[in-house]
Amino acid sequence: IDRIPASRLVLRGVTIDIREIALDDPEYRFRVDDFLRWEDEHGFIPPKSAVLLHTGWGLKWHDADAYVGADDQGVPHFPGYGTQVAEFLAEERSVRALGIDTLSADVGRSGSFPVHRTALSRGVLLLENLANLHTLPPRGFLVCIGALPVTGGSGAPARILALVAKPPLRPSRPSV
């Protein structure tokens, strides 16, 4: 993490809202066709972007049991990215980061972490446990990744900020 240049830590961002599906299916894997439908509605994403997946899980943060979603055997259940979409976003859209409001970019019960391996082997950063994704627009903001430069580390705590431009104020008409 200490070798990532600062220029790779400020990215254009897009937010993809899959709450409706993910809250009904706690093991939902975001897919390529989900992404293409989003792109049809919101437009092609620029290269070197951060894709943030809003699953609704961030709203469960106050209740650790609900956030982890562990069953009776202690296996966690929460949505994540599918391996194919992680590969597609890295290879076909040249994204630089995948973010999500769950504990992991992989689905909860994943023990082999295929999304981690797919993304990290392609130089794509993973941002997990993101908060307040419900406040972001689908596009048009910057993501600033304040990662600690842990020497030799494969990851680090980070403060992730989204900078959203305020619309210009409309001048009011003078009263007559």
Image (cartoon, rainbow, N blue to C red):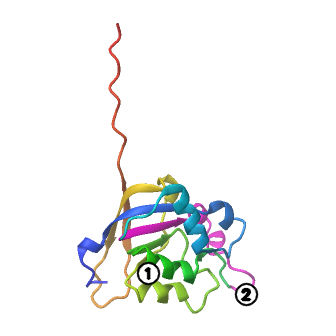
Mark 1: give few (<14), some (14-19) or many (20+) Cα within 10 Å.
few
In this view, 34 is above or below 165: below
Visible residue check, residue 169: yes
114 left or right, relative to 126: right
Percent x, y of residue 55: 59, 65
The kind of residue tagged 1 is Glu
Percent x, y of residue 153: 34, 88
Provide the secondary structure element on which disc 1 rests.
helix
Extent of the magenta region: 48-74
The label number, if any, that marks residue 165 in the structure image: none
- Residue that appears at 60% across and 71% down: 33
Residue bearing mark 2: 73
Residue bearing mark 1: 91
In this view, 112 is above or below 66: below
Visible residue check, residue 61: no
145 left or right, relative to 100: left
Does residue 160 show up magenta in the picture? no
Q: Nearer the viewer, residue 11 or 45?
A: 45
- Residue that appears at 47% across and 71% down: 99
As drawn, which residue projects farthest toward the right? 72
